[in-house]
Image: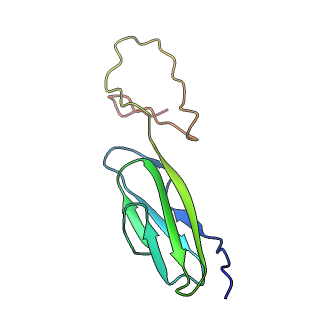
Amino acid sequence: MDHVPLEVSINASALIIGPGETVTLTANHYLAETYEWSNNETTQSITMDQPGMYSVTISDGCCSSGTVEIEVMEDVINDVSTVDDPDYIIFPNSAIDFFNVVFENGQKI
C-alpha cells in the first residue's frame, strides 16, 4: 500500500506562556492511532510549562503518517511593581492583544 501523508493539526490552549503557566497541545487527525511528540510523550495531548518548538508525528497504524510543529512563545511582559515617577508612558507588547496596569490603590486602566 502506498504511503499517504496525513495532514495533522494541533490545537493549543495558548501560544504564549508566562512564568508558572502551562499550555496544552492536542494533535488531531481522525485516523491517528499513535502519537510521538518531540518530548517523547506518546499521548494525544501534552501539557508544557516551557516555551519552545514542539512537534508531533502521528500514524494511522498502517502506512500513513504526518508531522506538524508549533512554537510556544515566552511572555515577555515584565512585572513592574513600583513606578516612582508619576509621569510615564506604557507601550503594549505587540506579541499580544492586551496589557493590564494595576496601581497600588487597586485602580486599573
Relative height, residue 99 to residue 70 (above, below): above
Q: Residue at x 31, y 48 (%)?
A: 20
Quarter of the picture holding the N terminus: bottom right
Left or right of 39, for residue 3: right
Q: Residue at x 50, y 36 (%)?
A: 99
* Image coords of residue 87 (percent x, y): 46, 11
Judge whether 1 appears above or below 8 on screen: below
Above-or-below relation of 98 to 72: above
Location of residue 75 (image quadrant) = top left
Q: Identify which residue is drawn at 36% across, 18% down.
A: 83
Residue sitting at the far front: 1
Position of residue 88 measured from the top left corner of the image (x, y, whole percent): 47, 14
Q: Is residue 22 visible?
A: yes
**Residue 38: image x %, image y %?**
43, 61
| Residue 15 visible in the picture | no
- Is 25 left, or right, of 65 in this rendering? left
Residue at 56% across, 84% down: 60
Q: What's the colour scheme?
A: rainbow
Q: Nearer the viewer, residue 108 or 26?
A: 26
In the image, residue 20 above or below residue 64:
above
- In the picture, measured across the screen, residue 39 lies left or right of residue 94, that is left
Quarter of image, res 40: bottom left
1 or 104: nearer the eye?
Answer: 1
Q: Position of residue 65 (x, y in %)?
A: 58, 75
Please tell me which residue lies in front, 91 or 88: 91
Total numbered badges shown on the rendered structure: 0
